[in-house]
Amino acid sequence: MLLTKQLLELRPRKMDMIFATKTCFASLLALYIAFSLDLSNPLWAMATVFLLANPYSGMVSSKSFYRIMGTMTGAAVAVILTPRLIHMPWLFTFCMSAWVGFCLYISLLDRTARSYFFMLAGYTVVIITFNDILYMNEQSIFDMALGRFIEISIGVVCSAVVSATIFPVHIGPVLQSRVGKTLQDTEKLFRIILSDETHQTNYTTLLARVNSDASEIHALSVHLWYEKSKFRGMTKPLQELLHQLSILTTNLVAISERLTQLDEMDKGYRPALAVLQQDVDHFLLQSTTLPEHYLNVLPQQFDDDFEAVFEAALPEQQVMLHSLKMDIRHFIQNVQTVKIIWYLIQKGEKHLPPHIVSLSTSYPSLHRDYGVAVRGGISAFLAIFIAGSMWIITGWKYGYMVASLTSICVCIMAAMDNPVPALKIFIRATFYTAVVVFIYAFGVLPYVTEFWQLALVLSPFIIFCVSLFPHPPLSSLALPLLMCTIMELNLQNEYVLDQIASFDGSIANFFGPFIAAVVIYFVRAMSPDITATRILTLHYKSVRETMYLPFGLEFKTQLCSMLDRIGILNTKQVQSEELKREINLSLIEVSAVIDLTRLNELLIKMPQEHILTQNLAHLQQLLDDYFRSKQLHLEHEMLRQNLIDQMSLILAQSSNYEDADIAQRLQISLNNIRSSLCRSIRAEPVNQPLQVA
């Protein structure tokens, strides 16, 4: 009912119709070429266009490249394995299932465009080999593999050429708009946090939007190499910009935490802070065409403005203000770093200035969920093995279609938390497909004698389905409806209506997604709450690891990975209020991990025999125990209280420590940890406030 309501309310945009018309033209062109070459399965040339369909030409080209490479790899594996295993059906089915499971496992770990290659290398083998068994008396496995490769290559080329030449939509301009908007939102966030005393209730939505935009920029940037916009080949610099932007996000959260903590005590410092905020705003709104030496420049009145803030604050707020000053200074410097990188990207420069430390690695600092990848691989193996076993046991001629469709379903939906609802829609689409195929097969196609007539009768249906692709709730219905219809019609040069084959095809289209849905339900499906809980477990483990990392490239790379993980967390539609609270706290915790690293550095610098050093080492162990208990989902309230008591003891002892610089750094870090990690918002005053360093 919900899909029906959405379908009735849909009003396709102009760009949707252009995209649908282009895709329809490319699919018919691919079908015409496949007919002209008299290929055995022209439908795969047409279906490939639908699988590659995307409004952005860069994404189409990217998927086209990896689809060809994946198909070539899958065809090669099929040619190698089939002659050796064809006479052992159970072992053959086992090996095919294991291969797809392994490829899907790798694909789920690789969150770049390369993942498409691994996925195609997997299920292409099943499609080729199982088809070959049906037609082994007519074609060799090599001919079958070559034919499939040619058919898919035709679809790939037609899709890429049409997308790049007819009203092309490039990713570059979209990225330019998104990056500019994200930078504006970041500076707006800074103004909200500093000027609005109730910012905690106002900035969360904007912060989530910045994180969402950053994730979308990453998703778009990986395809830049495959288009002709001015940002072609700028994937690595853009990933570096996103890494630096993630550090910027932690600055904003840390600033928000310090101001909340200060406001809990007294707001007398606010008028002086307003002056500081105006000067920083003016400084940040200057031209984005920045010279490289501008990186470490601060507003001219920065120190004087902060001196006025210190004078207006209470003595017990001084440590928090020291921390706030450090956070705002880092925020300004990070904004300049992001602007410089963006300026160089727009100039076409792919290399960073030597004094900007790159956070990018040979492999992007992205969260990889090994648990989901393992479950996805196992579910693919079991689903395909069950479908193949059903084919072996029953001897049903069209059982190969069940296995092929099962492999496709279990692979293309593996990235979802719970693919079962989407597979239910897929199953529903098979019933709609039966109606559409019946109308075409018995009411339309018998009267078609020329290709132009075929194109004319297929175009309205194709355009209608493809126009739904840009709308996620409806695309899950449109794609299977279109694909299953094309597969069941099985268009050939000499079209012969086979009622039994049509009926068998409809049954196969039902059982394929049904088997995939049942196996995924028991093996792979997880609710958003379960997924969020698992990711939070990895988050707490990462927090523990950062406690012992030196502040440097390794730490910053780890921090980028943690922020990427939190970005994924924010996309989960969790129901538990407790989980929502934990997700919100996770970003606050990340903003304070730098203080955990600083504690470790101070611990190394301080004399080992000093009582303060021993208490600090005990605190570090308590922190480790605290986050281990959260990682294992154990009761941690007593540990939390022990942490607060231990930090209070160290803060009292630090006031009399002989090294004033170390004492100040220690007080700042402990204050931040107590506020951000343990949520003890009102900090106890330090007996002897330190002067500004």
Image (cartoon, helix red, strand yellow):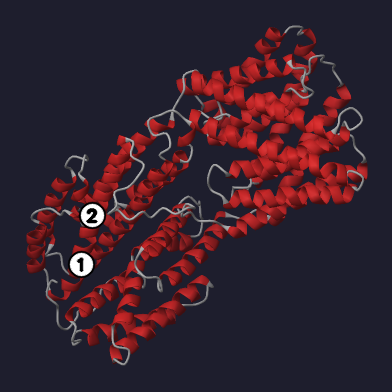
User: What residue is at 67 percent from the left and 32 percent from the top?
Assistant: 480
User: In the rendering, at what x and y percent does residue 88 appear?
Assistant: 91, 48
Disc 1 residue type (three-letter): Leu
| Crowd tier of the residue under label 2, counting other residues whose Cα lies within 10 Å: few below 14, some 14–19, many 20 or above | some
Query: Foreground residue, 392 or 366?
Result: 366
Q: Is residue 136 left or right of residue 19?
A: right
Task: Pinpoint residue 327: horizontal percent, then vertical percent.
Answer: 24, 62
The quarter of the picture where the C terminus appears is bottom left
Residue shown at 67%/49% (left/top)? 103
Q: Tell me the residue that label 1 is attached to.
A: 262
The mark nearer the N terminus, 2 or 1, is 1
**Vertical placement of residue 663 versus 608, above or below:** above
Mark 2: secondary structure: helix
- Tell me the residue at 32%/43% (across/down): 182
x and y, in percent, of residue 122 in the image = 70, 44
Image coordinates of residue 624 in percent, x first then y, are: 44, 77
Above or below, 373 against 146 in this view is below
**Image-quadrant location for residue 424:** top right
Q: Quadrant of the N terminus?
A: top right
| Quadrant in which residue 493 is drawn | top right
Q: Is residue 235 left or right of residue 109?
A: left
Q: CA distance from mark 2 to mark 1?
A: 23 Å
Residue 482 in view of the camera: no
Q: Does residue 496 appear to the left or right of 434 in the view shown?
A: right
Task: Judge by depth and name the residue closer to the eye, 427 or 63.
Answer: 63
- The residue identified by callout 2 is 333
Compared with 143, 210 (above or below) is below
